[in-house]
Image (cartoon, rainbow, N blue to C red):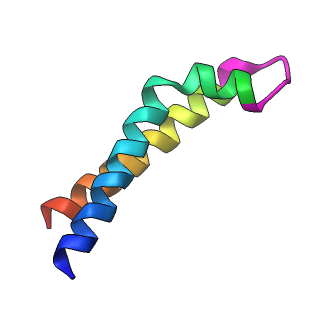
């Protein structure tokens, strides 16, 4: 059971890191409004939080 939880946490951390690095590309694909800087900033914050939660699950 612990291996499955660690694997899910690893996937969460990976998704968070991908969201941080590809936030601009993701916002261009998903959103069509003019203020993409605000959306990219929000995606980076969300990706950071997801990556931290995933890393904390693996750590503890």
Residue 41 position, x and y percent, is 57, 27
Left or right placement of residue 42 versus residue 49 in this view: right
Depicted 4 relative to depicted 50: above or below: below
The answer to whether residue 58 is above or below residue 1 is above
Which quarter of the picture shows residue 14?
top left
The region drawn magenta spans 30-38
Q: Residue at x 19, y 61 (%)?
A: 58
- Percent across and percent down for residue 27 are 68, 27
Report the side of 52 relative to 1 (left or right).
right
Residue 21, given in percent of the width and then of the height, sits at 44, 24
Between 11 and 31, the one lying in front of the other is 11
Q: Position of residue 44 (x, y in %)?
A: 50, 32
The answer to if 25 sits in the magenta stretch is no
Residue shown at 41% from the left, 42% from the top: 16
**Residue at image point 24% right, 53% down:** 55
Q: Which quarter of the figure is the C terminus placed in?
A: bottom left
């Amino acid at each position: 059971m612990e291996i499955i939880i660690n694997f899910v946490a690893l996937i969460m951390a990976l998704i968070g890191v991908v969201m941080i690095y590809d936030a601009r590309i993701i916002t261009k694909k998903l959103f069509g409004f003019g203020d993409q800087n605000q959306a990219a900033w929000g995606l980076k914050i969300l990706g950071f939080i997801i990556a931290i939660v995933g890393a904390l699950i693996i750590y503890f």
